[in-house]
Image (cartoon, rainbow, N blue to C red):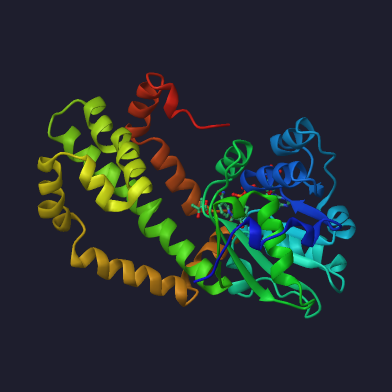
Amino acid sequence: MKIYYEKDAPIDAIKDETIAIIGYGSQGHAHAQNLRDSGLKVIVGQRPGSPNYDLAVKHGFEPVSAEEAAKAADIIMVLVPDHVQASVYENAIAPHLTKGKMLMFSHGFNIHFGQIQPPEDVDVTMVAPKGPGHLVRYEYERGAGVPSLVAIERDATGRALSRALGYATGIGASRAGVIETTFKEETETDLFGEQCVLCGGVSELIKAGFETLVEAGYQPEIAYFECCHELKLIVDLIYEGGLARMRYSISDTAEYGDYTRGKRIITEETKKEMKKILSEIQTGEFAKEWMMENKVNRPVFNALRRINKEHKIEEVGEKLRSMMSWLKKKD
Ligand SMILES: NC(=O)C1=CN([C@@H]2O[C@H](COP(=O)(O)OP(=O)(O)OC[C@H]3O[C@@H](n4cnc5c(N)ncnc54)[C@H](OP(=O)(O)O)[C@@H]3O)[C@@H](O)[C@H]2O)C=CC1
Ligand SMILES: CC(=O)[C@](C)(O)C(=O)O
């Protein structure tokens, strides 16, 4: 495994290049500002009429259309949502993806599943922060960075890696470290992680714990504190020093319960289901389901988003959030 740091990733590799950030959202607003603060020339491609357009203007950019940005840039970073990248690419980027340019992504979905097929004479790379976009900006501003991944799908110029690493330094990622991977590995592991562990797995675990305590007659607020609020404190310990650090810091009582009851929650059945979900990712089944869901305007997504927003845990959490300012997300 190769990890690159700032010394391995000189920003000079792209100092004379113009970078188009297509989409000023969670990742886009961070990349654009960080790259500009790193002294690089940035053009924002953001459609008008949305809060993200207004935010880009507020941040001192003069947003243009995705097509204008792609035409003017040497490096084009695609930071619109995964399910619209193919249409934005075909309509606005492909016509201006001339020889020697570099097409970049922060998630490999559309390249890996063949939704976007760039010409042979351009570099195709990825710099994928392993964290939310707002953290990418926050960490950069405090002089740090979010650990990221770099992948080279196509090296048409012979400079793809140095260009991608220069970009990684531009967003602050190489301060923390950039691990080399492939589009396949990043795509499949990222989808697995967000479905089985980080988002999907954790959300269902939190809800199940909360519901169990509330249905047993305990106060919802106490259930929330135990199953959601305190999770951050435990994860912070794991982030600092792994499971060992967390287990060192918690009580022996908690540690004993961890070892003896945890495996009754995450059972062999759970792991069998994880393998099934991974298989659905690897075979493209999930990708097809997600792309089809968007083609019919997301009926399942919209219904589940609404059902989850109406879950009791959201009401309780909102009530408690006002008690703890530090829980507030960094805007
Ligand atoms: N969110 C994250 O933390 C992470 C995201 N990524 C990857 O980064 C990429 C961008 O994701 P993310 O930053 O979350 O995206 P967001 O949803 O936060 O932002 C998307 C941006 O694209 C614009 N947009 C949406 N639809 C269209 C369209 N049809 N045509 C033109 N512009 C459009 C939006 O503009 P408008 O305001 O007008 O809708 C918005 O500015 C994805 O590949 C994602 O997988 C990778 C790591 C982490
Ligand atoms: C933050 C991140 O990398 C995620 C959860 O995979 C995503 O938002 O795509």
Dividing the picture into quarters, in which one does residue 274 lie? Answer: bottom left
Dividing the picture into quarters, in which one does residue 155 lie? Answer: bottom right
Residue 115 shows up from this direction: yes
Q: In the displayed structure, would residue 112 be above or below residue 190?
A: below
Dividing the picture into quarters, in which one does residue 228 lie? Answer: top left
Q: In the picture provided, is 139 more to the left or to the right than 16? A: left
Identify the residue at the far bottom of this view: 120
Q: What residue sits 61% from the left and 44% below the top?
A: 26
Residue 288 shows up from this direction: no
- Whole-percent x, y for residue 139 in the image: 57, 41
Identify the residue at the far top of this view: 323
- Whole-percent x, y for residue 227 in the image: 26, 38
Q: Nearer the viewer, residue 139 or 195?
A: 139
How many numbered discs sit on the rendered protein?
0
Placement of the C terminus among the 4 image quadrants: top right
Q: Nearer the viewer, residue 325 or 8?
A: 8
- Whole-percent x, y for residue 191 in the image: 47, 62
Q: In the displayed structure, would residue 71 be above or below residue 320?
A: below
Q: In the picture provided, is 111 more to the left or to the right than 275? A: right
Q: In the displayed structure, would residue 51 be above or below residue 27?
A: above
Q: What residue sits 21% from the left and 66% below the top?
A: 269
- Whole-percent x, y for residue 217 in the image: 13, 29
Q: What residue sits 62% from the left and 59% below the top?
A: 106
Q: What residue sits 54% from the left and 32% below the top?
A: 330
Q: In the picture provided, is 144 more to the left or to the right than 206? A: right
